Amino acid sequence: MPSRPRILLTRRWSEDVERYLAGHFDVTTNEHDTPMSAAQLAAAMREHDALCPTVTDAITAEVLRTPGARVKLIGNFGVGFNHIDVAAACELGIRVSNTPDVLTESTAELAILLLLMATRRAGEGERELRAGRWSGWRPTHLMGQSLAGKTLGLIGFGRIGQATAHKAHAAFSMNILYHSRHRVDAAIEKPCAARYCESVDELIATSDAISLHCPGGPQTHHLIDARRLALVKPGAVLVNTARGTVVDEQALAKALAGGRIQAAGLDVYEREPMVHPELLALENVVLLPHLGSATHETRSAMGMRVARNLEAFFAGRELIDPVA
Ligand code: DGY
């Protein structure tokens, strides 16, 4: 019997998926479930046929160019792949796959959760209550903003941006504005009456809530900087479930502290798991620990999506979700 492909999971995955993979591959798991160092990743590159990393692993050109590397596929557990040097992988003939589709709904749900928490001051309220500072109901207590009839501006209008727009429009009667590299088909715009906005600046200046859904990477680094934060409409909120590097955290902390931005809801950070200390000290920001896809259903589906890509690759078929 030919030997089974050797694959490394850099973090622990859902039990059902680990069990499935163990039935089909020679699997190495990371028992400590902590991020692997560059030296550990390099060693793994020499010992495995495929590496299955997550957002916490820096798959740099140096790691990919490990002398004596045997890895031929990077099967990423996640849709975002800005932690992988895809250009270097291409040069080396190493294939890369990701896990689109299966996390769209859960990530859109989390964007809506942050939108609600930020506009309704849910974090502030819970902290006040738990600290024993709640003195009872009163008409002017912790007043937030209603969503109905307000404009949600989405930057990035791929699967997750669209799902967020549909939920905001259908459930909260929000008007939808979006900016992306290209305008999408009218058939996609129609169900949520989405309007295309050609410029990021204009979208920022006219939205009551801004939600980020663009990929990470050099093109979007600090897309939301001090200049753009100064354009935000008074009373507007910002939600980020995309990548932390899209927002200049220092500038955001300043805008939130000065009341330039009413509130923010963040799930991702520039230097995870480090969170900017000035953000941690603010009341008007909701801070979640990168939970966008964190449901049992989604994490299993993500793992199985990696499994399908591994199976296709080792059977000599085209990848289901090729990135490179
Ligand atoms: C994703 O899938 O991109 C999540 O952010 C985790 O990497």
Image (spheres, helix red, strand yellow):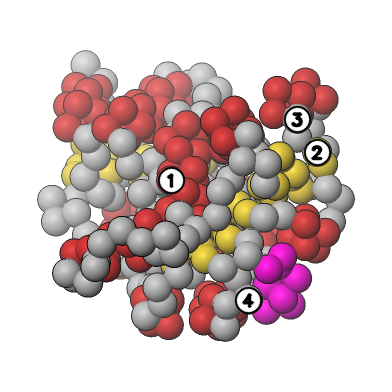
Per the model, the C-alpha gap separating discs 2 and 1 is: 23 Å
Question: Which of pointers 1 and 3 lies earlier in the amino acid sequence?
Answer: 1
Q: Nearer the viewer, residue 17 or 129?
A: 129
Q: Name the residue that disc number 3 marks.
A: 193
In which quadrant of the rendered view does residue 283 lie?
bottom left
Q: Secondary structure at mark 3?
A: loop
Residue 211 locus on image (x, y percent): 60, 52
Q: Nearer the viewer, residue 154 or 99?
A: 154
Residue 288 drawn above or below residue 179: below
- Specify the segment rendered in magenta: 226-234
Q: Is residue 46 magenta?
A: no
In this view, which residue lies farthest toward the top?
1
Amino acid at circle 1 = Leu
Q: Secondary structure at mark 2?
A: strand
Q: Secondary structure at mark 1?
A: helix
Q: Nearer the viewer, residue 214 or 113?
A: 113
Q: Quadrant of the C terminus?
A: top right
Q: Name the residue that disc number 4 marks.
A: 260
Amino acid at circle 3 = Ala
Q: Name the residue that disc number 2 marks.
A: 195
Closer to us: mark 4 or mark 2?
4
- Dots 3, 2 in contact, CB < 8 A: yes
